[in-house]
Image (spheres, helix red, strand yellow):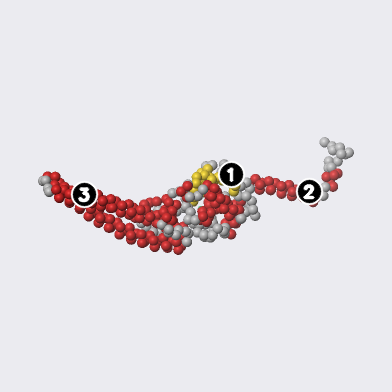
Amino acid sequence: MNPDPLYPRQNPAARKLPWWLLLLVTLIAVFVFQQWHAGFQARPLTYRIGTVDERFGMSREAFSNTVGQAVSLWQQAVPRELFRETPDGALEINLVYDYRQESSDRLKTLSLKIDDTKGSYENLKAHLETLKGEADQKGASLAQGFAAYNARVGAFNAQSEAARRTPVAESSYRRLESERKELAEAKTALMHRQEDLKETAKTLNSLVVVINGFAANHNLDLVDYHQTGDRLGPEFSEGEYIQEGGRRTITIYHFPSQDGLVRVLAHELGHAQGLSHLENPQAVMHRLMRTDSLDLSLEDIQAMKAKTGSR
Ligand SMILES: [Zn+2]
């Protein structure tokens, strides 16, 4: 095929197009594509508030605000929107009440100071020792009380039996009748003491749960109490993030304070963005969340930036 000599293959106008303009157009095209791609990647993770157990004494609105606080913590690290609360959010965030919070609430009613400090831990440990001593004493004294009561019941039964076989004087009947009443009262008193001892045992269990939870989170000594059962492992997770199939949930079980709740939420939100645990004990993303502060560590910030492609 011979090209028509009258119409050269190249457009004369194109020949005049300067190289830098071509380069500029290419650069603009690449930039626009990157922006579009980044925009696509940068969609925030949507979340919604699921269960909020009323035993925490926190309204849904207050919980949602607290989640918002945890979100803004991360938001300081990264300029783009990371999370957004929507009615049908992909990530469900729950506040579930179980033995962990129950135990620490029980101690709160006793005006025991509970927070994440070592002083609080030592304080609780000292209280545990005192209470153990009290419980042992109460237990021993109660056992004596029951033994004495049983002996009295035995004697009463024998006398009643004898009185039934051989008629006795009127005064003897009256004495038996008053003894019967006294025995009933003694039994009620013993039952009250037993209830009291049960309450002490529950408090002891709560103390052990909270102390061990704290100890596990701070690599401190675990304490022991015989009635605690197997629910007390070294694990005392305050919250968890789970991704199963299409379902993504954050569940919080325990928090010692409002700041503590923000911290544990921030930790789980970090997992939800794909962050792993960090070595720095001051990091929000540290495995045991030892920090007491509401600031992200440099490592937290770098990890989130790397994960979300922000510079
Ligand atoms: Zn974690």
In front of the other: 175 or 79: 175
Residue 40 appears at what percent x and percent y? 65, 45
First reached walking from the N terminus: tag 3 or tag 1 = 1
- Residue at 80 percent across and 49 percent down: it is 21
Res. 142 in view: yes
Residue occupied by mark 2: 22
- Residue 212 visible in this rendered orientation of the protein: no
Q: Nearer the N terminus, badge 2 or badge 3?
A: 2
Please name which of the two marks, 2 or 3, marks the residue nearer to the observer.
3
At x 20%, y 50%, the residue is 178
Q: Which of pointers 1 and 2 lies earlier in the amino acid sequence?
A: 2
State the quadrant of the C terminus.
Answer: bottom right
Q: Name the residue tied to disc 1.
A: 86
Label 1 residue SS: loop
Image spot of residue 38 (x, y percent): 66, 48
Q: Is mark 2 on a helix, strand or loop?
A: helix
Say whether residue 77 is left or right of residue 60. right
- Amino acid type shown at disc 3: Arg
**Percent x, y of residue 88:** 57, 41
Please give the name of the residue rendered at 30% of the width and 54% of the height, measured from the top-left corner.
Answer: 193
Give the crowd class for mark 2: few <14, some 14-19, many >=20 residues within 10 Å.
few
Q: In the shown orientation, is residue 286 left or right of residue 221?
A: right
CA separation in Å, label 2 and label 3: 110 Å
Which one is in front in this view, the residue at disc 3 or the one at disc 1?
Answer: 3
Alpha carbon separation for disc pair 3 and 1: 69 Å
